[in-house]
Image (spheres, grey):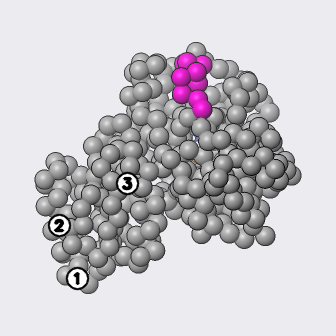
Amino acid sequence: MTVVINMRDGVDERKIKVAARFILEGKLVAFPTETVYGLGADALNASAVRRIFEAKGRPADNPLIVHIAEFSDLERLAREIPREAKLLAKRFWPGPLTMVLPKAEEVPDVTTGGLDTVAVRMPAHPIALALIRASTPIAAPSANISGKPSPTLAEHVVDDFYGRIEAIIDGGETKVGVESTVIDLTSESPILLRPGGLPLEEIERVIGEVKIHPAVIGKMVDVARSPGMKYRHYSPEAQVIVVEGERERVRRKIAQLVEEYRSKGYRVGVMGTEEYGADEFFNLGRSEEEVARNLFKALRELDKRGVDVIIAEGVEERGLGLAVMNRLRKASGYRVIRV
Ligand code: TXA
Ligand code: MG
């Protein structure tokens, strides 16, 4: 029932047509973007969008991002396009930036989780852009079962959705590895709702200071502005523990935790830059870019290797590090040890 469409060698217009027809018929097609894989449906077709929520097990009040291929599509989806949105689109689209804007009439309420705003982004991936151009604006959350780590490989989407959606386009591994940065432009001043693949520093260089929503760095809060913030996220089966702080102290603490958990009979996985004598190890790499790219794959992979506990090395919270730490803290259910 699920067709896996191989496009690892790049865009194939004939295969794109097949996938685009599925979208126009109200079916679900998972596709690669530069951040993570998306689970797509026609954004303007309410019953198609409803199927996304069912397939993911996603709460109906958690709105979706609408993906476009031309700036002119934005005029159809947003009632109003503020100056900052134009500046940011010009500088960063296509790319890992999502902007929340006042919603146009035409966008169904299901797509926006009942909000009067709509989140829009233009992905920087040739397959995603070709699919949108051949069909329509596409609503797409990350293509994972709600609460699981986001997918960076078609295999991850197969694991979660095989037999439950019409098609999965395999475009290989995604480049960025964390989802887009979400910024709200409907208040008096811009607010960062989710750190992501586009560093906040780069956005601020274009539009000046951006406020950070407290939920981005803090605990789980019940927020109306971005309902997604209040739900459990990115969680593998294993318990994740994040250790953050000064580098040497982090190393000592992780070594100590590995020993403690192992002596109690737990299988311990470590994700970071060193093995620390753990049962399983996933090397995240050293640069911010590598860590971001490997993060979700590491969570899924360590789970597959059957560990009980995953101990994650924290990174510095600048550049992509802000998004990485936000995902890690959520994955741990805020089990964070600061040393
Ligand atoms: O990189 C990405 O953004 C990926 C790829 C597929 O494009 N998509 C993605 O979608 O991460 P999703 O649904 O997993 O995350 C969308 C986030 C959620 O936190 C949601 O609450 C927020 O964007 N969001 C969507 N519409 C919103 C709105 N109108 N107001 C505030 N937040 C919104
Ligand atoms: Mg998601």
The residue at 33%/61% (across/down) is 283
* Residue numbers of the magenta segment: 84-94
Q: Position of residue 26 (x, y in %)?
A: 83, 52
Local crowd at mark 3 within 10 Å, few (<14), some, or many (≥20)? Answer: many
The residue type indicated by label 1 comes to: Lys
Tell me the residue that label 2 is attached to: 255
The residue type indicated by label 3 comes to: Leu
Tell me which image quadrant ligand 1 sits in.
top right
Q: Position of residue 327 (x, y in %)?
A: 41, 51
Q: Position of residue 236 (x, y in %)?
A: 45, 66
Q: Main secondary structure of the magenta part?
A: helix
The residue at 26%/84% (across/down) is 265
Q: Quadrant of residue 89?
A: top right
Tell me the residue that label 1 is attached to: 264
- The quadrant of the image that shows the N terminus is bottom right
Is 89 covered by the magenta stretch?
A: yes
Residue 118 visible to an observer of this rendering: yes
The residue type indicated by label 2 comes to: Ala
Is 296 covered by the magenta stretch?
A: no
The residue at 60%/52% (across/down) is 37
Tell me the residue that label 3 is attached to: 328
| Callout 1–callout 3 Cβ contact below 8 Å | no
Q: Is residue 178 left or right of residue 322?
A: right
